[in-house]
Amino acid sequence: MSNLTRDSEPPVELPLDGWLLEGEPAPGCGVCNALHLQRRQALERNDWAAACAAAREIRDHGRGH
């Protein structure tokens, strides 16, 4: 029987696509500004899921301007 060890290699870390965090808030829009703040705070705490979600909402909301 072979002696296999678990986790013999470090996990693979894939890069984050930069476009997932893109999105420009519309000037003067309170919703866009609030989402921009949420994205910035999420990035500061390394919460990539929340940052990407806020960026997506900025992009989607921007279509209505």
Image (cartoon, grey):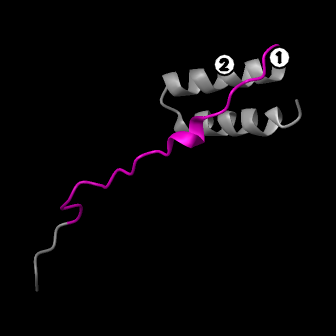
Amino acid beneath label 1: Gly
53 in relation to 33, above or below: below
As helix, strand or loop, the secondary structure at mark 1 comes to helix
Q: Quadrant of residue 54?
A: top right
Number of residues whose C-alpha sits closer than 10 Å to that of mark 1, classed few (under 14), some (14–19) or many (20 or more) = few
Q: Looking at the image, which residue sits at the far right? A: 64
Left or right relative to 5: residue 59:
right
Q: CA distance from mark 2 to mark 1?
A: 11 Å
Q: Percent position (x, y) of residue 8? A: 18, 62
Q: Percent position (x, y) of residue 7? A: 23, 61
From the viewer's side, name the closer residue of 28 and 41: 28
Residue 49 in view of the camera: no
Amino acid beneath label 2: Leu
Magenta-tinted stretch: 6-28
The quadrant of the rendering that contains the C terminus is top right
Left or right relative to 51: residue 4:
left
Seen at 40% across and 47% down, the residue is 15
Label 2 sits on residue? 37
Label 1 sits on residue? 30
Q: Earlier in the sequence, mark 2 or mark 1?
A: 1
Number of residues whose C-alpha sits closer than 10 Å to that of mark 2, classed few (under 14), some (14–19) or many (20 or more) = some
From the viewer's side, name the closer residue of 24 and 40: 24
Q: Main secondary structure of the magenta part?
A: loop
As helix, strand or loop, the secondary structure at mark 2 comes to helix
Left or right relative to 49: residue 53:
right
